Image (spheres, coloured by chain):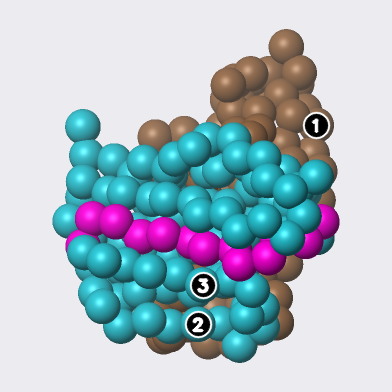
Amino acid sequence: DAMVIQNPRYQVTQFGKPVTLSCSQTLNHNVMYWYQQKSSQAPKLLFHYYDKDFNNEADTPDNFQSRRPNTSFCFLDIRSPGLGDAAMYLCATSRESNNEQFFGPGTRLTVL
Amino acid sequence: SQQGEEDPQALSIQEGENATMNCSYKTSINNLQWYRQNSGRGLVHLILIRSNEREKHSGRLRVTLDTSKKSSSLLITASRAADTASYFCATSQGAQKLVFGQGTRLTINP
């Protein structure tokens, strides 16, 4: 089945230790998104790619970076995780901008 | 800035009853979407309503959109225990992104 896959589902890292979260899709969608969601809050968009064009949200900290080496894969790099970065990270795709988005199951990040 | 504001923040009803959730937004939109999120999972798209549409149905779901009031509602009829989840509205404003509301936590009691 076509889907959005996130690995790992649970990630534990230490304060300041770089971590990479991955997302892959079999939908061949043009747009890929990364969201941060904290408990009982709305998903907050960090950045998105339209094809190879990277779009960073103005309030996304520099600590967060992303790579999209090809259509199928997108990575979220957190260079120096702080305690405040503990959250659920959601990857989503859409065929075109403003279309419905398809979400992966998320990666729950714990920072010790 | 947060575009969608949802009301109520939490809703608890008995199985079989109807559940209504409301969403208000501030600026003009291309479309408005509703998503469901089960605890600890990703979001699932439920329905998309365009700015020139007033009502849309999908199974037990009914969505209305009033662009003059900048508001939308999601009605779930004949609720089931499996409908227990958080429901988010999200607005598309022309940029390549959605802006999500804070969500309504719906609990269906058996």
Q: Is residue B28 visible?
A: yes
Magenta extent: A71-83
Mark 1 residue type: Ser
> Dot 2 corresponds to which residue?
A56
Marks 1 and 2 sit apart, C-alpha to C-alpha, by 38 Å
Residue drawn at x 50%, y 82% as measured from the top left: A56
Marks 3 and 2 sit apart, C-alpha to C-alpha, by 9 Å
In terms of depth relative to the viewer, which is nearer, B68 or A96? A96
Marks 3 and 1 sit apart, C-alpha to C-alpha, by 40 Å
Q: Secondary structure at mark 1?
A: strand
**With respect to residue B6, does A24 lie above or below?**
above
The answer to whether marks 1 and 2 mark residues whose Cβ atoms lie closer than 8 Å is no
In terms of depth relative to the viewer, which is nearer, A58 or A95? A58
Q: Is residue B3 magenta?
A: no
> Dot 1 corresponds to which residue?
B12
Instruction: Provide the letter of the chain coloured cyan.
Output: A
Identify the image quadrant of residue A80. Answer: bottom right
Q: Secondary structure at mark 3?
A: strand
Mark 3 residue type: Gln
Front position among marks 1 and 2: 2
The disc at residue B37 is: none
Instruction: Give percent across and percent down for residue A50.
Output: 30, 76
Pointer 1 indicates a residue of which chain?
A: B
Instruction: Give percent across and percent down for residue B9.
Output: 81, 51
Quadrant for the C terminus of chain A in the image: top right
Residue drawn at x 64%, y 74% as measured from the top left: A63
Mark 2 residue type: Asn
Pointer 2 indicates a residue of which chain?
A: A
Q: Is residue A77 magenta?
A: yes
Drawing shade for chain B: brown
Q: Residues within 10 Å of mark 1 (few under 14, many from 20)?
A: few
